[in-house]
Image (tube, rainbow, N blue to C red):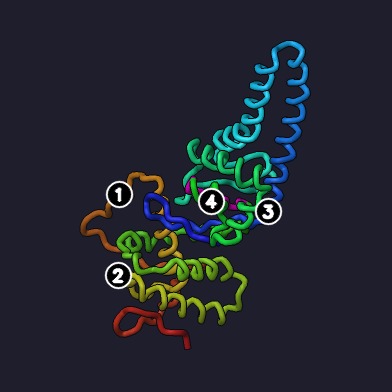
Amino acid sequence: MSQVVTGDAVELDVKIAQLPVRAVGALIDIVVMFTGYVLGVLLWSFTLFQFDKALSTAILIIFTVLVQVGYPVICETTTRGRSLGKMAMGLRVVCDDGSPERFRQALFRALASVVEIWMLAGSPAVICSLISPRGKRIGDLFAGTVVISERGPRMAPPPVMPPALAWWASSLQLSGLRPEQAEVARQFLSRAPQLDPRVRDQLAYRLAGEVLARISPPPPPGTPPQFMLAAVLAERHRRELARRRPSPGPLAPTVGAAPPAAPTSGNGAAAAPAAASPNGQGFAPPD
């Protein structure tokens, strides 16, 4: 996995395509291009008897350029970064910031491939991909692109915001929360129903304490740690989506309105309050 930073300063986790998978996708594209080229040459051979030699040669050169350059440019531009081989292998070309590939970048990659793949049998592309930490070939370096895999493990959906904590989550300062901490908390919440209750409670208090040390203000007294983690992750996800696709924010709460009551457990009874530390910056483990 690797991280890309969008133009809105949002960090996205992407799976960089591995060289063997890219090689298979490139081989599929080469087979498609070779097949099309052979058919084109067969049609071109009929022009030898209809046009003069110079015009027939010009037609062959133009057709060769269209196959080697036009095919990847047209495919990747119209499909937003995918050729037939990439579709088959679940790959896509994106910009370094995670945005879709543009025509100019597809053209740079195609022109570079004429030298590094067709003229030099792909040796520079393989060597550069092995050296680059993000698996880039020379064309990717010139174009500012990277090939990612779209067939990575499906991530669990973000936690649902507890309604009683929405007002608190909207005021959070989340700049100190590290991505790896948020990922650990997300994985815990997705697996919490499968854990032993005692182990689950211990992990919940420990993770809540670590997260609480990175955010402010502290949650309302008596907030169960799992509810607090869900509210933090749901709010973090909402803000990331808002940065990528700006939308009107939620209405401000009515001035003077009392904060909602603490969340309840699944059976409707009030959840047991989490013991807060004296400074209000952490959770104490259960007895």
Q: Nearer the viewer, mark 2 or mark 1?
A: 2
Instruction: Categorize mark 4 by other alpha carbons within 10 Å: few (<14), some (14-19), many (20+).
Output: many
Labelled pair 4, 1 in contact (Cβ < 8 Å): no
Question: Is residue 238 placed above or below 65 in the rendered structure?
Answer: below
Work out whether residue 262 or residue 140 is closer to the camera in this orientation and state it.
Answer: 140
Disc sitting over residue 217 in the figure: 2
Looking at the image, is mark 4 or mark 1 earlier in the sequence? 4
User: Which numbered disc, 2 or 1, marks the residue that appears first in the sequence?
Assistant: 2
Mark 2 lies on a secondary structure that is loop
The range drawn in magenta is 143-150
Disc 1 marks a residue whose amino acid type is: Leu
| Amino acid type assigned to the residue bearing label 4 in the image | Val
Mark-to-mark CA distance, 3 and 2:
46 Å
Q: Are marks 3 and 4 in contact (CB under 8 Å)?
A: no
Q: Which residue is mark 1?
A: 251
Disc 3 vs disc 1: which is toward the camera? 3
Q: Is residue 85 above or below residue 208?
A: above
Disc 3 target residue: 21
- Name the image quarter holding residue 177: bottom left
